Amino acid sequence: MNVRQAILAALRGEPGLTTKITDSLRERIDEDGKMARVIEAAGALEPILSEVVRKKPSRLGNLGLKSAQVLAGLAAEDEASSSELASIARNSVVGIVFVDVAGFTTFTAEHGDETAIGVLSELTKLAERATRTAKGKLVKSLGDGYLLAFPSASQSVRAAVSLRDSAVDKRMSDPEFPLRLRLAVHAGEPLVEQDDLLGHDVNLTARLLDHTDPDEIVVSETAKELAEQRLKKIEFAYRRSVKIRGLISPVTIYSVNPLRKPSSMGTLKKLKADYLSKSS
């Protein structure tokens, strides 16, 4: 429902207006970051409309007030979200986790959109629980994946292990949840832009997924060095160097609490040979 339809529905006295306007505005915000300016303006507009409606009630005036209240609420939500992310990044180093569902396009083609949305909803609950427990933030959903942020590298690794293991346990106990996750962990100093993370360290984390098997957690050497002193019970195994798109030098990665030997281990000799040949 677009904004125009929401207003028409209000004039017809349709219930549930607030939710519909909120959803419509959220879609617009996702499409155009400039919409945030409108939301900020609505925060100032709300008390003015409220006073007008009090003095001279009307259906149209109440509609304007309701819309402004919704907008102001979104503004407060956006500010709180930005504040939370800024708090996570206050110590400069942020633990960054990308989560991806392996083979999700094929799963959707075989089982249909409704089933796919259902299992993603269950996965989101697992992701939110693991993120919340480790004092992190689910920054955004990426269709069939997530970007997560944490106050430290160790917390990001803990959350990744918790999420991977929860997904494996659910898959074993629930035949209607067949999802296998790939998780990549890095630590760095990303840019915080409103309620999003940007920059080289975010891009690098995403690229690590190219070297991650289903059910595997891959951690950069940077994240490992920052986290391992606090994670005595976590195993960092299968050290190897991989070529990352856009970078000249290879990046060293590890598998965390591996369930099996990574498939990329079979190409290590070739990667090393290629690197040595380019260096000579």
Image: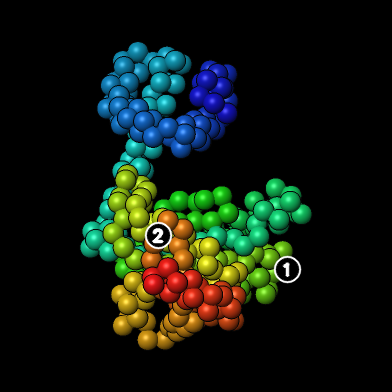
**Secondary structure beneath label 1:** loop
Q: Which residue is mark 2?
A: 247
From the viewer's perspective, is 3 left or right of 158?
right
Q: In terms of depth relative to the viewer, which is nearer, 20 or 120?
A: 120
> In the picture, residue 168 is in which quadrant?
bottom right
Task: State the CA–CA distance, disc 2 to disc 1.
Answer: 41 Å
The amino acid type found where label 2 is placed reads Leu
Residue farthest toward the left in the current orientation of the protein: 91
Q: Which residue is mark 1?
A: 175
> In the picture, residue 223 is in which quadrant?
bottom left
Q: In terms of depth relative to the viewer, which is nearer, 250 or 108?
A: 250
Q: Position of residue 224 (x, y in %)?
A: 36, 76
The amino acid type found where label 1 is placed reads Pro
Q: Residue at x 56, y 22 (%)?
A: 5
Whether residue 134 is situated above or below residue 35 in the rendered picture: below
Q: Residue at x 50, y 51 (%)?
A: 141
Whether residue 179 is situated above or below residue 47 in the rendered picture: below
Q: Earlier in the sequence, mark 2 or mark 1?
A: 1
Q: Residue at x 49, y 75 (%)?
A: 273
